[in-house]
Amino acid sequence: MAPSEVIAAMRALNLEYENVLETFSEPLPASGLMVCLPDMPVHELPPGWAGVWARPEAPPAGAWVPLPGGAIADPQALAQALRAADAWRRERLQFSQQAVDRAEALQTVNEIGIALSAERNSDRLLDLILTRARHLVAADAGALYLVKKDEPEQRYLYFALAQNDSVEAPWQASVMPLNPRSIAGAVALRGEVVVVDDVYAMPAQGLLRHDHSWDQRFHYRTRSIVGIPLATREGEVLGVLQLINRKPRAGVPLVDPVAATEVLPFSAADVELLRSLASQAAVSLENSRLYEDIQQLFESFVRAAVTTIEQRDPTTSGHSFRVADGTLSLARRLERLARGQWAGVRFSAEDMRELRYAALLHDFGKVAVRESVLTKAFKLYEEDLKILQTRFLLARASHRAGRLQDWLQEALRDPDGIRQRLPHLEGALQRELADFEAMFQVVLSANQPNVTEEGDYSALEAIRQRVFVDLDGQQHALLTDREAQMLSLRRGNLNPQERQEIEKHVTHSFNFLRTIPWTKDLARVPDLAGRHHEKLDGSGYPQGLTADDIPLGTRMMTISDIFDALVARDRPYKRAVPLERALHILELEAKDGKLDTTLVQVWIEAKAWEDIGTY
């Protein structure tokens, strides 16, 4: 029990007390004052505590105030010791709280650093930096400036972002010169922290000035400001973090933004925390810039690759870009689907980027296909058609020469008779020669490729049976078996061997794309691109995969690819298919189980095809 003298002294000092103890209560309060009387055990004082030591010998180390023997009966001495111990307690409590606050702040800074390092999007990164910095030091407002360079390497400030808890003030990105008299400009040029407790109290002739027009326009009072450089380890200033009006509580608007009486200055501890955050923010900004540079570099590579493909076959120029546009268009419309197999599907920005690259590069393997096959316009190669045309001309000339020779022999036998029959013979010869021309026109018509399996080739078979005799008496077929076989192709303009060579472009694409060290978010590009000619029923190529092995992205790409191939402008080997027929062909393919029925329906009903630029 505490003696009455101690109780009286504590009451006189307005100190709370308990009549206890030789042990501490649990849990301990954050702060306390212990009075150890003679013959009481001495406890180790926790942080935030202090004590009075009432023994004649030297007190133990720590926050103890000695009380000489006999002084317990001296109210003045006792009060003095208790007052000193209580002051010491408050100081220890303050230091203890500061340590806790600092530990929490450092933990917050570390958490912010982790969050910053995980963010790749530059706009979200800037917003994260400013938002977290303001919350860290309870700033009411703030702005972020980036240091940029123009073509002559002249630096300037880019006003990238602004925030304010207390007033709604519209802002827009803008550029401004690096003015050494503005706070942001001075920070960017010097690479040093600038702290101003009250911008309205800055000397008019000082090195820094503050433009008050914004305050006047939006009825606000800017008082305290801190500017922190966002600098790399090499000292390059990437930007400036400017915070305005520190307040008692983060996130709570100022009671009176015009007066701003509750605004506090930014302390040295605030600056230390902000410098730590700024160093991490600068690393994240630099990484973000490097990431964007890599993205731009890779984008240039992809575009160069696509250009290389299309230069080999100018007639398909733009196909890869249109397929990519159509695929992404279908993906965006698919996200709106409320029912069915793909309802609820969502594509992140990374998913869309991966899908776009796969679509752009889906035909890259065509670089390994022979140019003569790749650019083949008709069923016969141009040189083969010229040979065939020459053979028809030879047959026509040989037939005419044969008829003239017959007439000459007859004229030698019966000059008068041949003279009378000559008009009839001449007419018959012209009809026979015209027959050769008609047969060649049949050949030219058959040489045109078909989009679908259609056409009557009976006339072509009849021509294949025809022969002629040249001037040397040698017999020749008007059409060789190979020519007849090529001209009788039911669909397209390629024979099985040529089609197999073209179809290998998918394998070439996959093998090429697989050699690229894709990042994790682009890892599926080879698979997405390498399956765009597969069909859900297993009738596609090169592997004959079925629905379970064909990802959603590839299914969309296949629809876009087929549609563009159908409706693309006239090419030497085919005419453009009208929109209605192209859509009908897609519906038939879906009905036959080759294409995804839901995706084809969305493509048609949501008019995803409008974004590919063909219409």
Image (tube, rainbow, N blue to C red):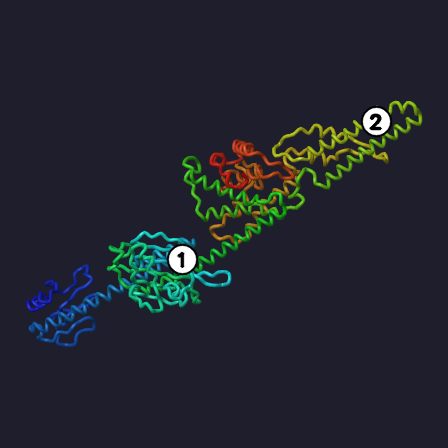
State the SS at label 2: helix
**x and y, in percent, of residue 398 in the image:** 83, 33
Residue 581 lies left or right of residue 122; in this view the side is right
Q: Residues within 10 Å of mark 2 (few under 14, many from 20)?
A: few
**x and y, in percent, of residue 390 in the image:** 77, 38
610 or 523, nearer to the observer:
610
Rendered image quadrant of residue 79: bottom left
283 or 534, nearer to the observer:
283
Give the answer, above or below, for where 376 lies relative to 512: above
Q: Quadrant of the N terminus?
A: bottom left
Q: Which residue is mark 2?
A: 426
Residue 413 lies left or right of residue 612; in this view the side is right
Residue that appears at 19% across and 70% down: 63
**x and y, in percent, of residue 204 in the image:** 32, 67
Point out which mark residue 159 bears: 1
State the SS at label 1: strand
**x and y, in percent, of residue 298 in the image:** 52, 53
Q: Residues within 10 Å of mark 1 (few under 14, many from 20)?
A: many
Residue 226 lies left or right of residue 381; in this view the side is left
